[in-house]
Amino acid sequence: MFSVGFTVGEVVFKGIQVVGVLVGLYLAGLGVAGFAGGGYGWRRAGFWVVFGSAVSILFLNPSLASFALPFFTTQDTITTVLTVGILISFFLIARLQRQIVDRDRRLAKLVQNLTLRDYLTSSGEEGSNRSVPNEDRE
């Protein structure tokens, strides 16, 4: 059977393995760069480093995925890898959804504060200690 790839010593790497290892290294580097830049905490950076390293290791040695076969009770390695990938995708999508909701809430609060400030400024009470306009005052 013809296989496209390149040889390093006795090992033949296929194109998908090279792409998988590069993606894994990119994810691990993303975690390190995020932590060094101050954008990520140690837990998030650690997650990306461990996840990226695991992806790289599994692509370098696909036979390691066979250890998880009894746990997932699947028939072959590719099904196991796809199952784990789908589970991780759902996890990441849920985290993104939570971050979007949090940012939406903060944006709504910012808009409310700006609107309130504009209202107080236009009514001539910018030096007042009044924080909320009271329409019921006489």
Image (spheres, rainbow, N blue to C red):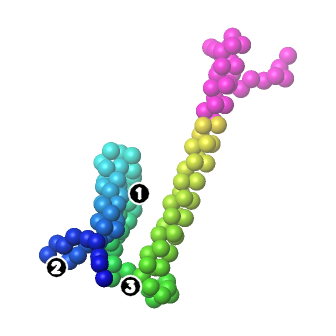
Label 1 amino acid?
Arg
Mark 1, Cα crowd under 10 Å, few <14 / some 14-19 / many 20+, is: some
Q: Are marks 2 and 3 in contact (CB under 8 Å)?
A: no
Residue under numbered circle 1: 44
Residue at 39% over, 50% down? 40
Write down the region rendered in magenta.
109-138
Count how many numbered circles sit on residues in the image. 3
- Picture quadrant where residue 43 is located: bottom left
Q: Nearer the viewer, mark 1 or mark 2?
A: 2
Residue 95 among those drawn in magenta: no
Residue at 60% over, 37% down? 107
Label 3 amino acid?
Ser
Q: Earlier in the sequence, mark 1 or mark 2?
A: 2
Q: Is residue 14 above or below residue 35?
A: below
Residue under numbered circle 2: 10
The residue closer to the viewer here, 53 or 83, is 83
- Picture quadrant where residue 94 is located: bottom right
Q: Residue furthest top?
A: 124
Label 2 amino acid?
Glu
Mark carried by residue 66:
3
Q: CA distance from mark 1 to mark 3?
A: 28 Å
Q: Earlier in the sequence, mark 2 or mark 3?
A: 2
**Mark 2 falls on what kind of element?**
loop
**Mark 3 falls on what kind of element?**
helix
Q: Residue 78: percent from the left, percent from the top?
A: 43, 78
Q: CA distance from mark 1 to mark 2?
A: 37 Å
Q: Earlier in the sequence, mark 1 or mark 3?
A: 1
Q: Residue 119: percent from the left, percent from the top?
A: 70, 19
